[in-house]
Amino acid sequence: MSRMVRRTARCVAAGAAVAAAITGTTFSAHAAEPVLIEADEVFGGVSTFTSTIEGCEEGTVSNGRSQLGGGPRFGKFNGFKIFECSEGGGFVVRLSAAFDDTGSTGTWAIIGGTGDFEDLHGAGTVVGTPTDTGINDVYTGVLRP
């Protein structure tokens, strides 16, 4: 993972620790857990991801059904991303993001899964940075039981 993504993961974990200290709760199998997913999406090619999800640390990601509104320089993406884990199983994310030529921002939610991830749920925000071949999307948020 990139330096920025590792720093973001530490910030998410630190924020979760502060929230736990303030509320007196700890993260367990029954509490929300911080999550970080970094997807390197290659337009017209194979897109890959890494994540902090146990059992799904890497895999491929593809577009499901989606709508793209606006023009080539700015607009809105509403649709689904299909994450397939290298070890089997996967999950589907509903994504809504606004974009322009500097990148994208939006929200996401896991709406379903397969295999070990059948009951996986979570939500958060996404920030996309353009690359020479596509976009690097960094999803941060929480997983819920």
Image: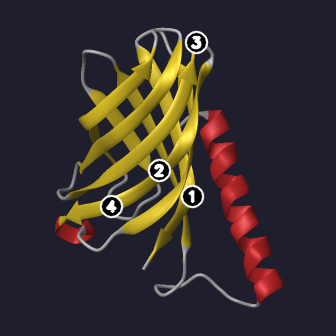
> Which residue is labeled 4 in the image?
111
Residue pictured at 23% horizontal, 70% vertical: 118
Residue pictured at 29% horizontal, 34% vertical: 66
Q: Earlier in the sequence, mark 3 or mark 1?
A: 3
Disc 2 crowd, CA 10 A, few/some/many (<14, 14-19, 20+): many
Vertical order, 118 against 101 (above or below): below
State if disc 4 and disc 2 touch (CB < 8 Å).
Answer: no
Secondary structure, mark 3, is loop
Question: What kind of residue is marked 3?
Answer: Asp
State if disc 1 and disc 2 touch (CB < 8 Å).
Answer: yes
Tag in front: 1 or 4? 4
Q: Which mark is residue 108?
A: 2
Disc 1 crowd, CA 10 A, few/some/many (<14, 14-19, 20+): many
Give the Cα separation between the discs numbered 3 and 1.
Answer: 25 Å
Q: Position of residue 40 (x, y in %)?
A: 42, 29
> Which residue is labeled 3 in the image?
101
